[in-house]
Amino acid sequence: MARGATMRAAFYEGARRFRTGTASVPAPGPGEALLRVRRVGICGTDLHIFQGHLDHRVPRGGVIGHEALAEVAEAPAGSGFTAGDRVVVEPLWFCGACRACRMGGSYLCYNLKVLGVDLPGGMREYWPVPVGRLLKVPAVLGDDHAALIEPLSVATHDVRRARVGTGDAVVVFGGGPIGALIAMVARQKGARVVVAEVNPFRLDMLATLGLQTVGPDQDLVGFVNDWTGGDGADVAFEVTGNPKAVRAMTEVVRVWGTVSIVAIHSEPMPVNLYQMFARELSMHGSRLYAREDWEEAIRLAASGAITLGPLVSRTIPLEALQEGMEQALGGGPVMKLLVDLTA
């Protein structure tokens, strides 16, 4: 890569404003590879950024994008990576010294920074990333499928943390990309799964994935009672961020069952704590991923155990990022949008 070359990039200019322009191609630092970005997914966190909810973390003029597939343009000697390798990016910076890191929870580092949120991300043609944050992508996965490894890693982490196993009854509140992936990973673990969703497009999509659903015209608590013979579900995942789901989540779980909070709730929510007491429920948060979750996600995707293709609603060029954000936020017939940096 000739130094002084320019590249296209999308810059955050404040709530509901992105600008596509040019910048100099960055030079990789020590221990970094220079990536040529191919795909970047738009996710819920990006929609929070778009609405200005994360202005305390994302600077004006910042480059977002953390769900990235890229190919290596340059890599340090002895790094194990060479030019042309396709890679996904584990977009985390952690200190390695705080209590969380010492406990083995580096993805929960007290000083955690996320590439594409707190630090510059992948909505640009070239991106320098530490080689320690890269994982190779099997050739069997096409670019669009490989671009979903990051959200699939979220799902593998969520399911692992909730200890979902064979025969479990699992309720997933929310059938967006993460909810659908959690449902498929849980099913692959041998669980019985039902997804509660209100969007007609997503209900149809979930049906094509072979997932059982409960729509807005059904009584979810009554359904789960019938479905489980009155016991309640073993695990409920809250993936909506919706107050109604939060109110219902503790009412669908059995004695000693588990409630997993996956959604980002931007403000406090009322929770029915009586059920926490009465059934001795366990509630936990589930955030991001460990390296083992990425490795599991790549294995599941490469083996075809998880169906990824239908989740990609469309790909858009970088110049259409603003429009894509607005479409994704609109809640219409869209599941996952990918920005194609090669377009």
Image: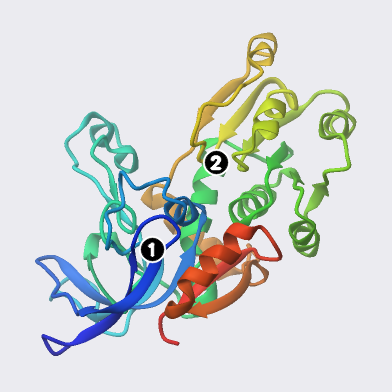
Image x and y of residue 103, in percent: 28, 31
Mark 1 secondary-structure assignment: loop
> Which label belongs to residue 263?
2
Of residues 117 and 18, the one drawn nearer to the viewer in this rendering: 18
- CA gap, disc 1 and disc 2: 18 Å
Which amino acid type is marked by label 2?
Ala
Of residues 116 and 180, the one drawn nearer to the viewer in this rendering: 116
Task: Evaluate whether residue 141 shows in this view.
Answer: no
Residue 313, image quadrant: bottom right
Q: Earlier in the sequence, mark 1 or mark 2?
A: 1
Task: Evaluate whether residue 110 shows in this view.
Answer: yes
How packed mark 1 is, by other alpha carbons closer than 10 Å (few <14, some 14-19, many 20 or more), is many
Image x and y of residue 133, in percent: 28, 60
Side of 226 where 161 appears, left or right: left
Q: In this view, does 294 lie above or below 126?
A: above
Q: In this view, does 242 lie above or below 51?
A: above
Of residues 75 and 300, the one drawn nearer to the viewer in this rendering: 75
**Quadrant occupied by the C terminus:** bottom left
Side of 293 where 79 appears, left or right: left
Which amino acid type is marked by label 1?
Gly
x 27%, y 54%: residue: 59
x 57%, y 36%: residue: 163
The residue labelled by disc 1 is 65
How packed mark 2 is, by other alpha carbons closer than 10 Å (few <14, some 14-19, many 20 or more), is many
**Quadrant occupied by the N terminus:** bottom left
> Which label belongs to residue 233?
none
Q: How many marks?
A: 2
